[in-house]
Image (spheres, rainbow, N blue to C red):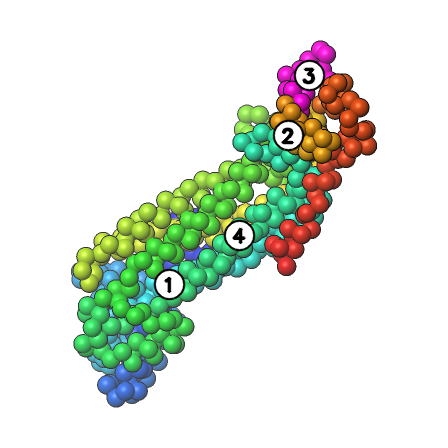
Amino acid sequence: MVPRYSRPQMTAIWSPANRFRIWFEIEALACEAMAQRGDIPAESAKTIREKGDVAMAAFSDADLARIDEIEAETRHDVIAFLTWLAEKVGPDSRFVHLGMTSSDVLDTCLSVQMTQAADLLLEDLDRVLAALKARAYEHRNTVTIGRSHAIHAEPTSFGLKIAGHYAEFARNRERLLQARKEIAVCAISGAVGTYAHIDPEIEEYVSDKLGLAVESVSTQVIPRDRHAAFFCTLGVIASGIERLAVEVRHLQRSEVREAEEFFHKGQKGSSAMPHKRNPVLSENLTGLARLIRSHVVPALENVALWHERDISHSAVERNICPDATIGLDFALMRLAGMMEKLVVYPEQMIANMESLGGVVHSGEVLLTLARAGISREDAYRIVQRNAMETWTKLNKPGFRTFRENLEADPEVAGRVSKEILDQAFDPAQHLRAVDRIFARIFD
C-alpha cells in the first residue's frame, strides 16, 4: 500500500525487521523445545537465544542488506536468513532449523503477523463503533426522511440510520474475531507435514509460546482456506465501510445537504471553483473499499494448492497481506474520524421531508382511511390520486399540498376528522419504536 494510505502501526507489522524477528523467535523456541527433550545440547539452545536476541535487537539496514545479498545468491529467503543468523550465532547455529522446513517458519510467521494485524483492526473497529454509538444517541430523535430507491419514502430517525451501521460493524467485529481465531495457528511439522524429522512436542511448545493453536493437518503448509476466510472477512468489513461512505456522499449532495464531512479551516475543495465542499473522505473510502475487496478473489484462488504444497500462493500473499490490512486499517481510522466530526443539519432534513407537499405521509393516511371504514383498495386509490395531484403540480400554478387535496376530496371530507389527519401527518409517530430498537442494538 502506498504511504498516502498507510499508518505506521500497521506498516510496521509487515516490515522486514518484524518478519525476521518472528522468524528468529520461531527458530529459537524450536531449539528450546528440542533442548528440553534432549534432542540438542541445552547450552547450544541458550547460546542461540542469547546471541540471536542481541542480533535482532541491533537489527539494522546493514543486516537487511546482508540478508538480501545472500538471497541474491541462494535464491531462497529462509536460507538467506538462516545463513545470516549463523554468522551471528556461530557454531551452535548447526542446531537451528533441525527437522524443519521453510513453510514451518513462513506460515507460522504469517499467522503471527495476521493476528497482530487483526488485533489492530479490532482496535480500529472499536473506535468506529464508539463514534457511531455516540452519533446515534445524539440524533436518536432527529427526524429525517427515509429513502427507498433513493426516493422519499417515510420519515425515520437519523440516529436510527446510524444505529443500523453500528449494528453492521458490531457483526463485522464478531466476524473478525472468528477470522483471527481461524488464522491463529502454528505448523512445525517438517517436510510434507508428517513430523518424520521433528516431534509434535516441538510444535506444541512453539505454538503455546506464540499464543497460537496447533494446525491439525498442515500438509507442510497451513491450509489456505483459513487465509481465504480471513480476507473474505476483510472484504465484508470494507463493504460496510463503503455502505456508510455512500450514505454520507448522498447526504452531502447540493440538492440534499442534510449532513456533510467536516470542512477544515484552510481546506480547499477545488482548484477552479472556490465554493466547493466535496465529500473527499467518503469518496476515498469508497475507493479503498474497492481495493480491499479486490484481494478476496486471489485469496480464494490460493486455496487450491497442488498436493502437499506449492508456492503459487506465495507471491499473492506477499502483496495482499500487507496491502489489504494496511488499507483497511487506514480506512477504518478515516471512517471513525469522519463520523466523529460529521456535521448534521436537522433543519434541512425537515425541509427536505416536507419539500414534496406532504406526500411522504401517504402510508399513514392510507391506514387512517382504512380505519375509518373505507376498503383498503378504495383507500389506496384515494390516497394515490391525491398524492399524484400534489406531486405533478409541485411548484406549479394551482399547487395544493397533499393535506389540502385530501381535505377537498369528497370521498375524504366528513369521514376523517381534522384531529385524526393531524395524527396521520405527525412525523413523531415514526419514532415510537426507536427506543426499543436502540435497546436491541446497544443493550
Please state if 439 lies on the left or on the right of 171 as rendered. Answer: right
Q: Which mark is residue 376?
A: 2
Q: CA distance from mark 2 to mark 4?
A: 40 Å
Q: Identity of the amino acid at label 2?
A: Arg
- Which class describes the residues within 10 Å of circle 1: few (<14), some (14-19), or many (20+)? many
Q: Secondary structure at mark 4?
A: helix
Dividing the picture into quadrants, the one containing residue 374 is top right
Q: Indicate the secondary structure of the residue bearing disc 1.
A: helix
Q: Which residue is mark 4?
A: 169
Magenta region:
382-401
Spatial distance from mark 1 to mark 3, Cα to Cα?
60 Å
User: Are there few (<14), some (14-19), or many (20+) residues within 10 Å of tag 2?
Assistant: some
Asked whether disc 3 touches disc 2, contact meaning CB atoms under 8 Å apart, the reply is no
Answer yes or no: do the residues labelled 2 and 4 have beta carbons within 8 Å? no
Q: Nearer the viewer, residue 22 or 62?
A: 22
The residue carrying mark 3 is 395
Residue contact at pointers 1 and 3, CB within 8 angstroms: no
